Amino acid sequence: MRTVDKELIKGWIPSREDDHDTTKRDYGQVLLIGGSAGMGGSIIMAAEAAVQSGAGLTTVATDATHHVALHTRVPEAMALPLNDLMGISDQVKKSTVVAMGPGLGLHERAVNIFRIVVASIREDQTLILDADALTLLAREKSKLRTQKVILTPHAGEWQRITGLNPKDQTNEQNQDWAEQLHATVVLKGDRTRIYTEQESFLNIKGSPAMATGGMGDCLTGIIAGLCAQSRNELEGLVSAVYIHSLIGEELAKHQHMVRPIQIAELLPTYIKSISTN
């Protein structure tokens, strides 16, 4: 298991120092899907993190009641109504990265959205499943068409997918399941572990001050934003996990708790520092 540190990722973070002839489309198109009525905060935090991490274009499919809040907090993001299934399907096809789950819910509409996304995704696109989308994956037992699948469970969600009790979630078992699922797994915890079909990583940054609602949604947005820009999704993913925890740990030196939006606000500064040093 490789330890994730600054030395590992510094060559993986995309730098814009010499990219003088690029446009927003060169930095990836992200689609975030979630935020059923009353659950808009989750997907808005993910959207802010995706934008702040540098995604070229960010679109959010969320309940229409959240569109004003989304555009107030993240005016750079575009919005789609969550009940526009045709629009979501079309946007999936245009996107570099699709992240689904924060605040999505488990109702019939959520199931339909999940099925549409799984049916629409292409092999060359990155699909991130988080939160409610992980529960739907466990229930639907869908075969995912893309080879670039990222799952971001905590121990309880991982148990729903694999049947493994938290005490049985050993490195060997987790690696085996990553191979069976043909996915990269970000097993969130005090020391987040990342499993691919070939290798594994241990993140040693982070703080208990980060144990608050929305922290995982923020991480999902960072993963989406960096995967959209990186040479490959693994480099973007590992970098995202490290930077998210690094900022949280630094903030915790002076705060009792850390808010996800504080991490999002500092992303451009930290990404710039790591990518240019």
Image (cartoon, rainbow, N blue to C red):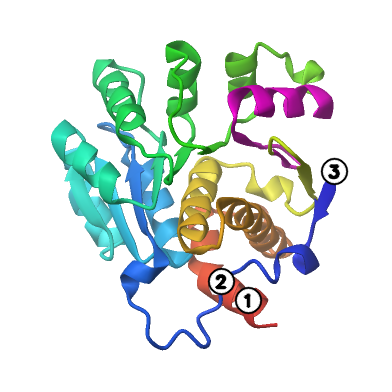
Q: CA distance from mark 3 to mark 2?
A: 24 Å
On whether residue 178 falls in the magenta region, the answer is: yes
Residue 67 visible to the viewer:
yes
Question: Are there few (<14), some (14-19), or many (20+) residues within 10 Å of tag 2?
Answer: many
Give the residue pinned by disc 1.
Answer: 275
Q: In the image, residue 247 lies at what x, y percent?
A: 65, 63
Tell me: residue 34, above or below residue 133: below
Residue at disc 2, secondary structure: loop
* Segment colored magenta: 170-195
Tell me: residue 103, above or below residue 255: above
Give the residue pinned by disc 3.
Answer: 1
Q: Which one is in front, 46 or 147?
A: 147
Residue 266 visible to the viewer:
no
**Which labelled disc corresponds to residue 50?**
none
Q: Tag 2: residue type?
A: Pro
**Mark toward the start of the polypeptide (3 vs 1):** 3
**Mark toward the start of the polypeptide (3 vs 2):** 3
Q: Tag 3: residue type?
A: Met
Q: Residue at x 33, y 77 (%)?
A: 23
On whether residue 80 falls in the magenta region, the answer is: no
Q: In the image, residue 121 lies at what x, y percent?
A: 35, 37
Q: In the image, residue 269 lies at what x, y percent?
A: 56, 76
Tell me the quarter of the image containing the C terminus. bottom right
Question: Are there few (<14), some (14-19), or many (20+) residues within 10 Å of tag 3?
Answer: few
**Which labelled disc corresponds to residue 14?**
2
Residue at disc 3, secondary structure: loop
Tell me the quarter of the image containing the N terminus. top right
Horizontally, residue 4 falls left or right of residue 99, namely right
Q: Tag 1: residue type?
A: Ser
